[in-house]
Amino acid sequence: MFEGLKVSAFLAWKAIQRGSKGTLILTIMIIALIFVNLVFLPSIISGVVKTFDTQSIEFDLGNLVIEPREGSQYINDATELQKKVERIPGVTGTSPRIAAGVTYFYRGRNAASTLYGITPEDERSVTRIAEYMIEGEFLSDGDTGAIVIGATLAGREGEEGGGLPTLEGVTVGDSVEVAYPNGETRIYRVKGIFETQSFGVDTAAFVTSQEMSDVLGLQDQASMILVKTEENGREDEYKTEILSYGIQENVWTFREKAGGFVDQAIQSFNIINTISTLVSLIIAIVVIFIVIFINTVNRRRQIGILKAIGIDQQIIINSYVLQVLFITGVGALVGIALNAGVTTYLTAYPLVFPGGPVYPDVEVSSILQSIASLFAVSIVAGYIPAWQIAREEILSAIRG
Amino acid sequence: MGRVEVRALGGVSLEVAKGEFVGIMGASGSGKSTLLHILGLLDRPTTGAVTIDGTDVLSLSDHRRTLFRLNRLGYVFQDYALIGELTALENVYLTSLVRGDPKEEYLKKSTEILERVGLGDRIHHRQSELSGGEQQRVAIARALVNSPSILLADEPCANLDSQTSKSILDLFARLNEDLDQTIVMVSHEDWHKEYFCRVVTLRDGLIESVTECR
């Protein structure tokens, strides 16, 4: 058995070493590109999910969102609830928000979007919007008459929003009029403009809770309380923990708040990925089959001679399978290198999705799975043509 | 059209003694290659028996036949049948590798045999770098490396000029005498007869004559 494998390896290596270099390099490159295709799409899907999660947690919702109980528009005694939640182990920050759908007016232009009333210090303990100011400053706790607005809502002079709300050119220091749903209007001075690249956040604006409560006539009330936890990815456990403290309000994880959007997107991506994977693997099978088939048909007589001089059929078949394993192995290595290049490029120049910049997230499991599936199809595609020719009667093989 | 049954051989009975150099001759279609293929375990007769070194080779399984060919028989084909990617030395020691012989031993033995067939200075050359005569010498060395009970040669000079053919036949004769190597060779050249101990002439699948030559 071992001697046989040694001979197969000897024959395979000599064929690789002294056979056609052009065919060998071309085949390796095809396998490498198939490998890149197998790894690339899952890495983008994983990147999209990661971007969505990160953007949601860092800019939009925190890890968990507490909302008013059924039938209520606001959470009452928001401060007390906030303090209660902050005492729960694992909770690192909370930020009560008042949300209202408003219309903004600026130099004859208007845009409808969401305005949030926040406590700036609390907001800093949950989201990182304050770190993403591209102009001016974020709100401070005592601010009244000031607003910070998202880059998309602020817009640029002469540029339309393409369906997104935009005021086309607001800058720091400008005055923006806000019409509240209760009919009140206020004029605010723009204190800062932020850009998070999360379109839901960049189309919104913030004033202090104090300011918004005055306009809407609220007293220690909030539309939601965002909760930041110590660790990401354990939202379900924290949710259970919070509920166990007897909190009556609705508690949602950020994923639940997305209303299945991410799950649906992942499902759609996975269908595309499965089709792409199947096509790639079929191409791999066809390429390897053709290469080995042509190789063995051209060497039909040689295979007959090898059998005639006493070399077992399995040794001959294995020599072709080992050639295929070599081609696939080197192809996978070249593929890993190419993929590293593509990943490095896309990390420097990420793809821009509505949810934010998407960086390829190459998972080790995806690489291992791609390598395993490539090897599996390669072995089958190499074995069959070699077996077909090697099992032929010696004399008919020798006669060609 | 259905398949037409062709009786290539019928009623052939032949005994080859150890150390004999037997020539099988006859016109095209006389059955000489079929006889050689049966002796070489490359083909099975529909009836009859073939015994080599006391072994009834027709009763062997396919695997045993492969091992028998590997360990007890040596082949020289008309068109050399070397493996293009291997050097002369590698072509010769390939079967030793399958048998699992120690590396030092098979390298020494293969080199010695290549020197014996006159290719001591060409052992690292590949098929494309060798002349027809040199390629056939490599094939002979490959056939001899396992010290076979019978060396079977199927028209080994068919693709060679007369000068090179003579050198190959001289080599066969020398191996036959020096090593007491049994050789069965198919040929259709009359002048080859002088090299054979015995000539078996076939006609229409039957032995027409058996002539002692030297």
Image (cartoon, rainbow, N blue to C red):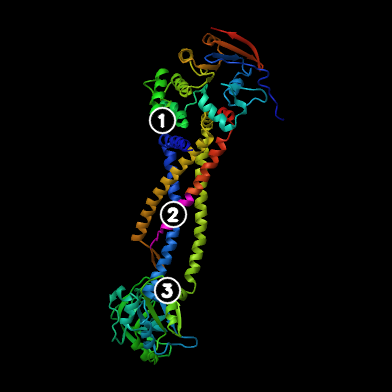
Pinpoint the chain carrying mark 3: A
Pinpoint the chain carrying mark 1: B
Q: Amino acid at mark 2?
A: Leu
Q: Is residue B132 above or below residue A177?
A: above
State whether residue B178 appears in this view: yes
Disc 2 target residue = A368
Q: Are marks 1 and 3 on the same chain?
A: no
Whole-percent x, y for residue A57 in the image:
39, 73
| Region of the chain picked out in magenta, as a range | A359-374
Whole-percent x, y for residue B92 in the image:
44, 26
- As rendered, which of A107 and A215 lies closer to the eye? A215
Disc 1 target residue = B102
**Would you call the spot at circle 2 few (<14 residues within 10 Å), some (14-19), or many (20 or more)?**
few
Q: Residue furthest right?
A: B1
How far is mark 1 from mark 3, CA to CA? 65 Å
Whole-percent x, y for residue A336 in the image:
39, 51
The kind of secondary structure element at disc 2 is helix
The kind of secondary structure element at disc 1 is loop
Q: Amino acid at mark 1?
A: Pro
Give the number of callouts. 3
Q: Nearer the viewer, mark 1 or mark 3?
A: 1
Image quadrant holding the C terminus of chain A, namely top right
**Magenta region includes residue A68:** no
Residue at the location (44% across, 62% down)? A45
Whole-percent x, y for residue B55 in the image:
58, 24
- As rendered, which of A40 and A203 lies closer to the eye? A40
How far is mark 3 from mark 2, CA to CA? 29 Å
Disc 3 target residue = A235
Q: Amino acid at mark 3?
A: Glu
Residue at the location (38% across, 70% down)? A54
Q: Nearer the viewer, mark 2 or mark 1?
A: 1
